[in-house]
Image: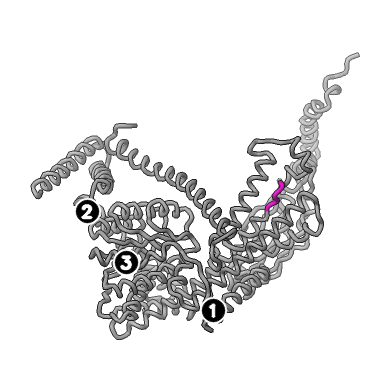
């Protein structure tokens, strides 16, 4: 005996009977004078209307050790936020700034229980609430207390960084004081720096000027500062030899600082009358406009010596190649690894990275700068010992699971972490 | 010589005019066809003028150079004035100045932090006078000192602390190639780039490279004996790195050249589509 089609296919039976039930109920509604709304609710209540509990325990706190630019929110997700058959589709965080209107600031996925608002200002007050999102609507939580972000003066998360900084600073101070007491501090020879006097002398003999290019960065770059320190020594030699220097720059502040540096050197050499502001001139801030002008100057003035010291970018090879083509002695130096290959290829001497900073101390011979250089060497020694310890610890920990080495590695990573 | 110069200049002017006319004719249907034709011709002329420096210094290069420097210097000055002084400073200092420059006034009461840069800026300009020129040293000293102080912490983090912790590498491999003993290493020897041997060699190269590199930059000891050999190995590693970097960067520059040549052949000469 064959069963009816609807009986053999339960899903089909639902599809067939559902319209019939609706029609029957609608007819009954008309017959007994009931409203459509009540009947609709009765029919679709279980399938469409999905209510969800709001989030609870909503808390807001000021971001720790920040500049007063973050507030952190925490909450317990809705009890209807489940992994399977969840009614919750997400959460929407609302914010009221200075008791103004509520505005949504972010939509989050289900399961999320925290959010950090990084778009806050110091002098404003903020109130938050979190709405639980479902297919049928939003279910807001209670509002938080009003809170204003606070700025902390000390970031205690960087305690280890502070200790490392203090150790290196103490080493620098120790060596500076040692040098001041007259003890001779040894610094190894740096190739290229010995050639400075020779290069300036060559320019003097040939009757040609010296060109000094301090890179294209502003005074907020330590490479520019190092270049200007070397400029002091170079311009002193130039003043002694009665040679000429010209220095096109791409930053107005560098122009001012360079003029001061050269002026001081000329005064120290006892030749203040030989100084002229036109030795340093501003060209343009535009990178390749500056390069075009310096290249033109090189081929027209034909300097015997070119110094390329400071922060260089894509223009490094263009400048170094032009200097090479006019037969100038070139002494270059930068701490930008991407540009060093070009200087090494096209210049006679190149100060690689740290050597640029060491050069100023080496050239000046001043106790303060030599002490600073020796103090930095203490930092390098610490780095080498720490790397050795860390590598041994992680190797023994990974290969043989030595517990104490695992702890040592974890501690070293914590101390030398980026935060 | 002068006659040759005149002939070359006349020839270039003639070519410029011809290019402009031909482009204008080809763009005759467009609203700003004549202007666009001029701009394309000018861009091509300036590109070729700059490239002419490869031959030798010449009046066309000088023209392009001076135009570039003049326009860019003026542009940066205007940019600094309108964005920094008019855009940032005046709206915080004065309602009158803000309305004069048609900027929205940001009333926040009297705040000394806005006046400090004003005073320092004026002090910097004092160097234009003979008598008060010494005042310009103060803001400069502040810039240099602040820069050194801020960068000390920044570089200590990025160039020291992070570099040290990044070098903590297991010399006998790590997951998924954890060291299981020499026998297991030999029996599972894999020469591919993702194998254990490659991982071990890579970690050793980084470890030795970093230590020898630091030794090269150690200035307090004479580079002789074992220390000197380690230093020489360090500079070798640096040079190999620079060689790779050189090739990589040159490839990038070639792509810039291709971009310019594409402009000349496509937009200007319209030889390629």
> From the viewer's perspective, is the residue at label 1 or at label 3 nearer?
3
Local crowd size for mark 1, using a 10 Å CA cut-off: few (<14), some (14–19), many (≥20) = many
> From the viewer's perspective, is the residue at label 3 or at label 2 nearer?
3
The mark tally for this picture is 3
Q: Is residue A228 magenta?
A: no
Q: Residue under label 3, please give it.
A: A200
Q: Secondary structure at mark 2?
A: helix
Q: Residue at x 77, y 42 (%)?
A: B182
| Precedes in sequence: disc 1 or disc 3 | 1
Residue B259 image point, x, y percent: 37, 41
Answer whether residue A315 is visible to the viewer in this image: no
Q: Secondary structure at mark 3?
A: helix
B230, A5: nearer the viewer = B230
Q: Is residue B172 magenta?
A: yes
Q: Residue at x 45, y 67 (%)?
A: A359
Name the quadrant containing residue A255.
Answer: bottom left
């Amino acid at each position: 005996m064959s069963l009816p089609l609807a009986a053999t296919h339960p899903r089909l039976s639902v599809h067939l009977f559902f319209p019939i039930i609706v029609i029957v109920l609608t007819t009954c509604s008309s017959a007994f004078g009931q409203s459509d709304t009540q009947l609709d609710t009765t029919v679709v209540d279980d399938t469409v209307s999905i209510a969800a509990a709001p989030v609870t325990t909503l808390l807001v706190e000021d971001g720790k050790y920040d500049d007063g630019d973050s507030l952190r929110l925490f909450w317990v997700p809705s009890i209807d936020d489940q992994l399977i058959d969840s009614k919750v589709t997400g959460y929407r965080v609302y914010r009221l700034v200075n008791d103004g209107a509520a505005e949504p600031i972010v939509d989050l996925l289900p399961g999320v229980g925290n959010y950090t608002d990084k778009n806050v200002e110091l002098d404003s007050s903020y109130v938050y609430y979190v709405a639980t999102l479902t297919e049928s609507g939003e279910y807001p939580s209670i509002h938080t207390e009003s809170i204003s972000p606070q700025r902390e003066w000390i970031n205690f998360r960087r305690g280890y960084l502070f200790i490392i900084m203090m150790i290196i600073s103490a080493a620098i101070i120790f060596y500076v004081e040692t040098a001041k007491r007259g003890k001779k501090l040894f610094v190894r020879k740096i190739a290229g720096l010995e050639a400075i006097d020779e290069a300036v002398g060559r320019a003097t003999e040939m009757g040609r000027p010296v060109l000094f290019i301090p890179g294209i960065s502003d005074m907020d770059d330590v490479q520019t500062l190092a270049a200007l320190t070397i400029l002091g020594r170079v311009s002193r030699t130039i003043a002694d030899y009665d040679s000429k220097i010209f220095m096109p720059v791409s930053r107005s502040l560098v122009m001012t600082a360079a003029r001061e540096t050269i002026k001081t050197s000329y005064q120290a050499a006892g030749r203040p009358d030989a100084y002229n502001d036109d030795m340093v001139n501003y060209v343009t801030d535009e990178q390749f406009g500056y390069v075009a002008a310096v290249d033109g100057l090189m081929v027209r003035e034909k300097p015997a010596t070119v110094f390329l010291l400071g922060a260089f970018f894509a223009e490094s090879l263009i400048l170094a190649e032009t200097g090479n083509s006019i037969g100038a002695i070139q002494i270059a130096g930068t701490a930008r690894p991407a540009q060093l290959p070009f200087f090494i290829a096209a210049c006679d001497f190149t100060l690689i990275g740290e050597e640029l900073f060491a050069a100023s101390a080496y050239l000046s011979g001043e106790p303060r700068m030599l002490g600073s250089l020796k103090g930095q060497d203490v930092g390098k020694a610490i780095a080498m010992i720490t790397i050795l310890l860390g590598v041994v610890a992680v190797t023994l920990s990974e290969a043989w699971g030595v517990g104490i080495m695992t702890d040592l590695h974890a501690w070293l990573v914590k101390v030398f972490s980026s935060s | 010589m002068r006659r040759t110069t005149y002939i070359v200049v006349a020839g270039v002017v003639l070519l410029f005019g011809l290019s402009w006319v031909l482009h204008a004719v080809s763009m005759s249907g467009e609203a700003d066809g004549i202007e666009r034709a001029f701009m394309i011709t000018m861009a091509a002329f300036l590109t070729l003028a700059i490239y002419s420096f490869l031959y030798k210094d010449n009046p066309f290069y000088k023209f392009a150079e001076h135009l570039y420097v003049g326009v860019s210097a003026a542009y940066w000055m205007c940019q600094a004035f309108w964005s920094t002084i008019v855009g940032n400073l005046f709206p915080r200092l004065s309602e009158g100045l803000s309305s004069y420059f048609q900027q929205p006034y940001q009333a926040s009461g009297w705040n000394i932090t806005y006046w400090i840069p004003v005073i320092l800026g004026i002090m910097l300009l004092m160097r234009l006078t003979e008598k008060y020129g010494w005042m310009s040293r103060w803001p400069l000293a502040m810039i240099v000192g602040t820069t050194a102080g801020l960068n000390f912490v920044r570089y200590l983090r990025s160039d020291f602390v992070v570099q040290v912790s990044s070098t903590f590498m297991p010399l006998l491999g790590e997951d998924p190639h954890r060291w299981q003993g020499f026998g297991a290493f030999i029996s599972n020897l894999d020469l591919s780039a993702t194998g254990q041997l490659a991982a071990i060699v890579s970690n050793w190269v980084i470890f030795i490279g970093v230590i020898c590199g630091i030794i090269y930059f150690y200035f307090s000891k004479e580079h002789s004996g074992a220390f000197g050999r380690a230093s020489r190995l360090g500079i070798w590693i640096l040079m190999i790195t620079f060689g790779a970097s050189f090739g990589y960067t040159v490839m990038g520059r070639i792509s810039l050249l291709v971009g310019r040549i594409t402009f000349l052949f496509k937009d200007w000469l319209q030889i390629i589509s």
